[in-house]
Image (tube, helix red, strand yellow):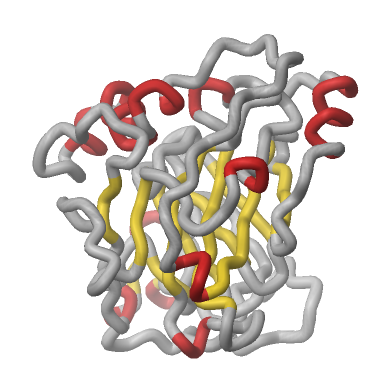
Amino acid sequence: MLDRPVDRARDQGWVFGLPPGIASEEWPLDPVTGYPLMHGFTLKLPEDYRVHGADIVALSFFATAPDHNDGGAPDDPEVREAVKARPLHPRLSRMTDILNYEYAALLLTRAEYDGPFAMPPAPLALASAERPRWLDVGGACAFFEAAPAYAKKMFAAPPRADLSETRAIGMMPRADDPNAGKGPQDEYTRENPPTGYQPYYYYVGGKPGRDNFRLHDWAKDHAHNHLGGTVRPCQAVPEMSPFYIEFEEYFGGYNFGGGNAQLDFRDMKFDWACG
């Protein structure tokens, strides 16, 4: 995440702000609250990550607003059924976490990615939760207002209070990653055939323990937000395809309990863990 707004002609997408190229009625609503899910980021995929076809060039990720994410999701069948009855984007995938909060991803064509920003729809008339802060000031400003000091340092200046306020995504290849092209998995808990994936750490002398813990040299300069390769989850390694993005809370403004998340956009799996 760069410290400036997006320039679509040269950047690889944007964090916060609004999704591109969709109708407002296609914006996914939260079946828990009836409010629009919060747009976290829109990422333009490198060509070798376009696993859904050459014309699917990007994805937009949506999440439960952090001020609606606390302690476990209530279930209102009337709200859920009303959300289910609404028009859907043709390439919408919905996901839930272990607390039954909702997330969604939209796969975008080139025309959609290049299109104008979409405006969020009105919440359902049934919605009874408190209005999420991002709908009034934008995701960037809402996150900055509530962020701990270390996260505020990700911003060169406080974001504007505007729904369209973004931060650009820049991308560079990792110089060295033996796990590039390999699906993450834990050798002891995996459910699928081995992919050749290896952990980013080792124990001196093969003896587990805090004093013997070491990072491999090839992992020491890996960025926290990345596409594919070596995963650095806060807890267990999620078993995923090689086509995933790992990201921190500030990469869109979420409540992951100080942890981070992984989105497998080939198989549409989502996982997060607290720090």
Locate residue 79 relative to residue 265 in the image: left or right: right
Locate residue 3 relative to residue 171 in the image: left or right: left
Q: Quadrant of the C terminus?
A: top left
Residue at 57% in and 11% down = 130
Residue at 20% in and 29% down = 149
Q: Is any part of residue 156 visible from this angle?
A: yes
- In the rendered image, residue 226, in percent from the top left (x then y), is placed at 39, 68
Number of numbered labels in the structure image: 0
Q: Which of 89 and 152 is in front in this view?
A: 89
Residue at 25% in and 38% down = 151
| Image quadrant where residue 141 sits | top left
Q: Is any part of residue 220 visible from this angle?
A: no
Residue at 70% in and 16% down = 127
- In the rendered image, residue 54, in percent from the top left (x then y), is placed at 58, 88
| Image quadrant where residue 114 sits | bottom left
Q: Quadrant of the N terminus?
A: bottom left
